[in-house]
Amino acid sequence: MGSVARAAVDQKLAVAKRCSHEGVLCGAKAAAVASVAAAVPTLACSRMLPWARGNLNATAQALIISTIAGAAFFIVADKTVLALARKNSFKEG
């Protein structure tokens, strides 16, 4: 490969790394917000509602909260990476 081609590949790799890093940061922020937003009603229901008090132990509560946080992370990270990739492809094209 020539030096021009290698520079273009290196530039594309740097853009891809930046996009993925921004996706991870946005996903982590969304996961933190989603876990708080899920924890409040989950814990409140498990203390107040008789059915939830009897059927949702600590493991079930943690599973509900972590599932929502994980889903929020992956959805936001994926949308962020795709949006940045789309924006960068229009710049180069």
Image (cartoon, helix red, strand yellow):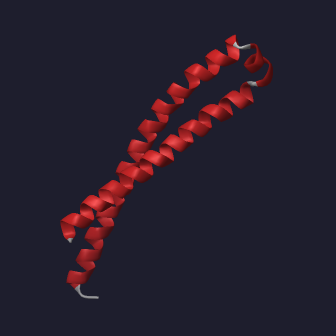
How far across and how far down the image is residue 30, in percent? 44, 37
Q: Residue at x 61, y 39 (%)?
A: 67
Is residue 78 at least partly visible in the picture?
A: yes
Q: In which quarter of the view is residue 70 placed?
A: top right
Quadrant in the picture for the C terminus: bottom left
16, 71: nearer the viewer: 71
79, 2: nearer the viewer: 79
Quadrant in the picture for the N terminus: bottom left
Q: In which quarter of the view is residue 69 placed?
A: top right
Q: Is residue 73 left or right of residue 89?
A: right
How far across and how far down the image is residue 74, in percent? 50, 48
How far across and how far down the image is residue 72, in percent? 50, 41
Q: Residue at x 80, y 19 (%)?
A: 54
How far across and how far down the image is residue 77, in percent? 43, 49
Q: Is residue 15 above or below residue 10?
A: above
Tell me how many marks there are.
0
Q: Residue at x 73, y 20 (%)?
A: 52
- Residue at the bottom extreme of this rendering: 1
68, 23: nearer the viewer: 68
Q: Residue at x 49, y 37 (%)?
A: 31
Q: Is residue 23 left or right of residue 73?
A: left
- Residue at the right extreme of this rendering: 54
Q: In which quarter of the view is residue 76 placed?
A: top left
Is residue 18 at least partly visible in the picture?
A: no
